[in-house]
Amino acid sequence: MIDQISAWLVANWVQTTAAVLGIVYIFLSIKQNILTWPVGLLTSALYIYVFFVSKFYADMALQGYYVVVSFYGWYVWLKGDTQQQARLEVSRTPRHLWLWLLLATVGSFLLIEFVLQHYTDSPIPVGDAITTALSLVATWMLARKYIEHWLIWVFVDALSTGLYAFKGLWPTVVLFSVYTVMAVAGYWQWRKELNDVQVQPVKAAR
């Protein structure tokens, strides 16, 4: 049994390594550690190969997007708020952005689903398109430290777990199961920080 497991891990070392790095990535993002972005970049690079082999083409393209956004998030978290030149803090998504985020999600879904249906042999085009479109938006929200991105990830990760089980990507199934739980934990951790910031007493002017 141990020999079989070892042989499987060796044969699937790229997926296994990506899954381990993915767990490290989500833990770092909960802690708002700057290493979130280089680890996420490496994870995404490995998953480009995994999803290409498994014919999850939208997810493969999504990983390419993650690579680009990793550089953006890395820059923003290092530089801080561009207006106040301070550390970027956790915040709620501004109301005026929700309509644009919704339009971006729907537009991305329709485009991705059309491409998958007509130009690929993707086995689950609708599910693949839904998770990809939502992930595009959620990753950008993470780069801006908008707390609601965790709620989107809870849904995306839970749905992705089922999709990857369908394709037999078991290390990735484990990864996204852990992602789902950690997304809930991440939301509560960021919410606690947000509440702590909001209740800080304001110093009286002298």
Image (cartoon, helix red, strand yellow):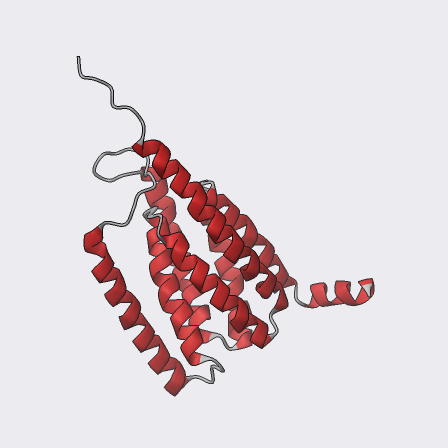
Position of the C terminus, as image quadrant, is top left
- Residue 95 locus on image (x, y percent): 21, 52
Q: Nearer the viewer, residue 10 or 197?
A: 197
> Is residue 180 visible to us here?
yes
Above or below, 77 against 126 in this view is above
Q: Residue at x 23, y 49 (%)?
A: 94
At 33% from the left and 48% from the top, the residue drawn is 146
Q: Of 120 and 166, which appears nearest the observer?
A: 166
Estimate the x, y position of residue 195 in percent, counting from the top left. Answer: 35, 36
Closer to the camera in the image, 119 or 180: 180
Whether residue 18 can be seen here: no
Q: Position of residue 202 (x, y in %)?
A: 25, 23
Q: Which residue: 47% across, 51% down?
A: 184
In this rendering, is residue 122 above or below 132?
below
- Please determine whether, in this image, residue 88 is positioned above or below residue 68: above
User: Is residue 162 found left or right of 6 in the rendered image?
Assistant: left
